[in-house]
Image (cartoon, rainbow, N blue to C red):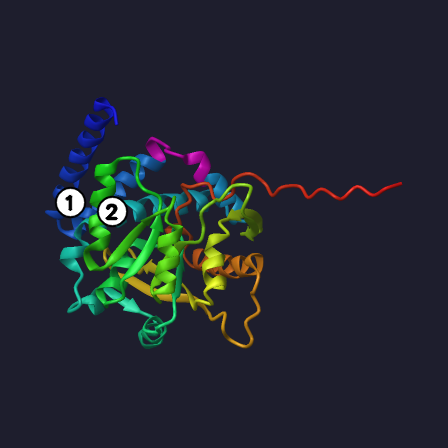
Amino acid sequence: MPLTRTIADYSVYVAVRLAVGALQTLPMSACAGIASFLATLCHRVLKIRHGVVDENLRIAFPDMMPTERDAVAWRMWRHLFLMICEISQTHRKLHRTNYRELCEIQDIGSVVRQLISSRPKVVICGHYGNFELGGYVLGLFGFPTHTVARELDNPYLDKFLNDFRSRTGQHMLPKQGSRPAMEQVMADGGILTLLGDQAAGDKAVWTNFFGRPASTHKAVALFTLSFEAPTLVIYARRQGAQPMHYYLGQQGYIDPAAPDFAYGSAPSFIEWFTQRLEEMVRDAPDQYWWLHRRWKGAPPVKREKATAV
């Protein structure tokens, strides 16, 4: 790596560490105020990715009025900034002894029974709510997970973020080149966590998300189907406007070994969990990351075989 790039990356890392250190000294009420201010600055003053956010909302909610879209976009920004503040303080605020004060967990007994199985498990989530908190809480209860995520371009920030993730046993696997490690996790009966709403280009499976085709990585389905792994679609949804209060729920559960399992192909399985993700987003659209382009490109045109005359 060139020296100038190293200096630039480390300078950014130091700035982020200083900002995180400052956030950790503040009460959450002050963090909420900062999040609201930054949301107004980014959305209404600087208009960062304003066109992308508005276009995504128009695709997902064509009947939503412009004023409603504006309000949802502002609340999304506030949620994202507040989420950063919460992550910076999670290891101090959230423990096994007080999780009930901050997190309400839907049918915790059922989730535990599913996760303690010796069979391999797949957990699917999306860019929704506080998915970082979901992985943290699973580790807090003694369920180590292996999460596939793209490495950050800045290696210092990447290590800093992964150190947070691994505090309770969440192990990170790079998006590129980690297939053997992922297969080993499955073979060992572990828990593999995947994001199910990332655009995957033209060589992926296309399925409707809010009525428009979106590309999805085949691997999200192949690990469930190849290993007959029970699969959960989960979320960590913010409750109200108060910081650090979340509802952890399960939007869907499926077992490929069940006699009535009806999603044995990658397209049908991807359609199943994509519908679950859409249901989650509809429940709280201001907690979805409308900043990223979910709908990229278009499905390839199927060419009809030429017939001899």
Residue holding disc 1:
23
Residue range highlighted in magenta: 44-53
Q: Quadrant of the N terminus?
A: top left
- Residue appearing at x 50%, y 52% in the figure: 218
Q: Amino acid at mark 1?
A: Leu
- Residue 154 position within the rendered picture, expressed as x and y whole percent measured from the top left: 26, 35
Under tag 2, what secondary structure?
Answer: helix
Q: Nearer the viewer, residue 129 or 95?
A: 95
Residue 259 occupies quadrant: bottom right
Could you tell me if the residues under marks 1 and 2 are in contact, i.e. CB atoms within 8 Å? yes
| Any part of residue 95 in sight | yes
Under tag 1, what secondary structure?
Answer: helix
- Residue 62 position within the rendered picture, expressed as x and y whole percent measured from the top left: 55, 47
Q: Is residue 299 left or right of residue 245?
A: right
Q: Amino acid at mark 2?
A: Ile
Compared to 115, does 57 lie above or below? above
Mark 1, Cα crowd under 10 Å, few <14 / some 14-19 / many 20+, is: many
- Residue appearing at x 50%, y 63% in the figure: 225
Residue holding disc 2:
84
Q: Is residue 249 left or right of residue 156?
A: right
